[in-house]
Image (cartoon, grey):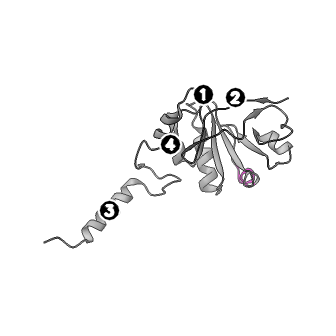
């Protein structure tokens, strides 16, 4: 029988929500879902609509895999250690290169310090580590009012916004 990972605090689209899609480890899918399962288990189960895949951080995200994942109800991206940044790249590729519009959920060793940056890469759901506090996590999502670099939430770097603002002020008639 697959092992179910303990329920963790969950934030989806900037709100604390009841845990759903429990993560299952194991070689077979649970008899009924919903459940977040390993990619190979999801494939073996015929891509059931009550199952969602989670991708290990070393997943090579090819166009073929992205096509497979396009119909997944959500995609989990595993962060085995908070220092492993490969999941950021997976999320960003899913959003920008492959146009995935569904929920991308960070799972694993997810800390509040990462949430703002993960959200800039296209992650919109966070299964927090058990010791993380939801109110602190919600505050962390708005740590900064703007990002310097382009992200999935804003393709323009900060300097472009500043130049546009400056150009707008220069075009305004001088006050007499």
The residue pinned by badge 3 equals: 165
Which mark lies nearer to you, 3 or 2?
2
Q: Which comes before the other along the chain, label 3 or label 2?
A: 2
Q: Is residue 145 magenta?
A: no
The reply to whether discs 1 and 2 touch (Cβ–Cβ < 8 Å) is yes
Residue 117 is labelled as 4
Secondary structure at badge 3 equals helix
Residue at (51%, 54%) from the top-left corner? 153
Residue 2: image location, x then y, percent = 82, 30
Q: Which residues are magenta?
A: 62-67
Q: Residues within 10 Å of mark 1 (few under 14, many from 20)?
A: some
- Looking at the rendered image, the disc whose residue lies closer to the viewer, 1 or 4, is 1
- What quarter of the picture does the N terminus occupy? top right
Sequence-wise, the earlier of marks 4 and 2 is 2
Q: Nearer the viewer, residue 36 or 163?
A: 36
Rendering coords of residue 62 (x, y %):
70, 50
Above or below 18: residue 98: below
The residue labelled by disc 1 is 130
Say if mark 1 contacts mark 4, CB within 8 Å: no
Q: Left of 116 or right of it: where is 110?
A: right
Instruction: From the image, tell me which residue sits under label 2.
Output: 6
Gap between marks 3 and 4 measured at Cα: 25 Å
**How many residues crowd around disc 3 within 10 Å: few (fewer than 14), some, or many (20 or more)?**
few
Please state which of residues 110 and 138 is positioned toward the viewer in this rendering: 138
């Amino acid at each position: 029988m697959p092992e179910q990972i303990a329920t963790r605090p969950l934030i989806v689209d900037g709100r604390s929500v009841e845990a759903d899609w429990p993560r299952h480890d194991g070689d077979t899918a649970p008899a009924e879902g919903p459940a977040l399962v390993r990619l190979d288990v999801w494939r073996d189960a015929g891509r059931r609509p009550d199952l969602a895949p989670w991708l290990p951080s070393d997943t090579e995200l090819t166009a073929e895999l992205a096509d497979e994942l396009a119909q997944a109800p959500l995609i989990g991206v595993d962060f085995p250690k908070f220092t492993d940044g490969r999941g950021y790249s997976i999320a960003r590729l899913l959003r920008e290169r492959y146009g995935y519009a569904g929920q991308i959920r960070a799972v694993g060793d997810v800390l509040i310090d990462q949430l703002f940056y993960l959200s800039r890469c296209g992650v919109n759901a966070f299964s927090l580590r058990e010791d993380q506090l939801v109110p602190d996590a919600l505050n962390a999502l708005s740590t900064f009012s703007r990002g310097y670099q382009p992200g999935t939430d804003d393709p323009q770097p900060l300097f472009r916004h500043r130049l546009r603002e400056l150009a707008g002020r220069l075009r305004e008639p001088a006050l007499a």
